[in-house]
Image (cartoon, helix red, strand yellow):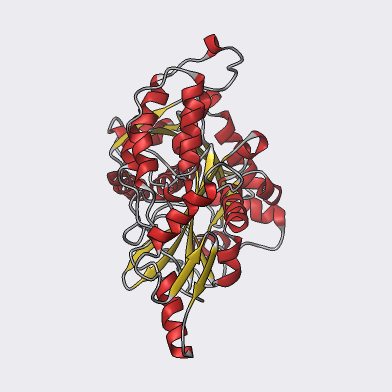
Amino acid sequence: MPFGLKNADVTYQRLVDKAFNSQVGRNVEVYVDDLVIKSYTEAEMLRDVNETFCTPEGIKLCPDKTEAVLQLPSIWTIKEVQSLNGKLASLNRFLSKSAEKSLPLFKTLKKCIKKSDFHWTPEAEQAFKQLKQHLSELPLLVAPKPKEELIVYLSASYRAVSAVLMTERGTVQTPIYFVSSVLQGPELNYAPMEKLVLALVFAAKRLRRYFQAHPIVILANFLVEKPDKAPPDTSVVETPQEPWTLFTDGSSCVDGSGAGLILTSLEGTKFTYALRFQFTTSNNKAKYEALIAGLRIAAQMGVHNLHVSVDSKLVANQFLGTYIAKEDNMVKYLEKAKNLISGFANFSISQVPRSKNKKADTLSKIASTSFAHLLKQVLVEVLKEKSIQEKEVATVVEEEGPTWMTPIVEYLRDETLPDDKKEASKLRIKAR
């Protein structure tokens, strides 16, 4: 309470009298901002201090503050939006991902130089209604115990980062503090992992007193609206129910095989991956490996609505049933891919010309040849094993001693190559 204002001391005195009504005159005396705990013995002192500062029911938000927002009608002026944002600022500690939920409201104030520039958008109205719903169901916060281990869950979306500080008691996790921040300028272009690190930095600054007094466990996860139980095991990056598009391309060459993946949403969120295969494979198999890797990543991110664009006519038509997969390995790849799409609510696939898939195509070629320099530019991953178990090559050589086929057989069986690079290159070509 800001002292210096008229009647501030009287108002504060009424507040503390009400808060300590059951103790005043018994073991506590309160005068304005001075509080004295009265005890005769050390044991009584510990008991009285615990009674004074104990919050067994947790920390509740003042009902008057939430009621003031819940009763607000639809907004029509700049001043009403500014007033609402001020009210929401006092609720940030209790509201999960408050920055992200309030973002459509902030957008209505952008470039509003004159009153006539203000427009209350349908997006803002929808966000306003959702905020009211969230405010009517705010969770009860708890106070941590001394030296108690605390858990921080991090969340990152395209426009905001968030964190929640929680404690686990028994089998239930309950929140202590919510923090969030809107991303601006270059921060919007950070990689997902960089945004999570930024969320951690922001949380550590905001919750410094908790970080200094407690052991902290850091997790990357979604924030749940009602964190009354352990959050589900989900992805590090937020993925709403909106449609996503996956561009894939696999490339095989003499020096190696790789893939390029680009996953984008309608809102403009983009994730770019370069994959390097630590195994040799044909071009068509590399295309399938790229598709399977992309489906796996999308599933791990929690994407539900996915459209895949591939530049391989064979892969797209085998998937759609236009072409029949006859080769044993192609059948296995097709089955593997179809098993992965069962986790998506909506799925579609189409073949696109290479001209419309240039970025994924370029990434796959770079990943096949020169991989190290990509580490600072895109998300990279090394695949050590194939997605399927290919049928082993069975060979019978009746001649005694090595023949012209011996190097090829050894390569197909053990993937051993001659030391001479030119001979190794020729051997790969013959084996195909």
Q: Residue at x 60, y 53 (%)?
A: 197
Q: In this view, does 102 lie above or below 430?
A: above
Residue 376: x %, y % from top left: 68, 48
Residue 345: x %, y % from top left: 28, 39
**Is residue 333 toward the left or the right of residue 370 in the image?**
left
Residue 349: x %, y % from top left: 36, 32
Query: Is any part of residue 294 visible from this angle?
Result: yes
Q: Nearer the viewer, residue 120 or 277?
A: 120
Residue 135 position by quadrant: top left
Q: Which of 320 and 160 is in front in this view?
A: 160
Q: In this view, does 380 lie above or below 114?
A: below
Q: Is residue 276 above or below residue 89?
A: below
Query: Is any part of residue 131 visible from this angle?
Result: no
Q: Is residue 146 above or below residue 417?
A: below
Q: Residue at x 41, y 82 (%)?
A: 47
**Total count of labels:** 0
**Is residue 99 toward the left or the right of residue 331 in the image?**
right
Residue 295: x %, y % from top left: 40, 44
Q: Nearer the viewer, residue 64 or 328?
A: 64
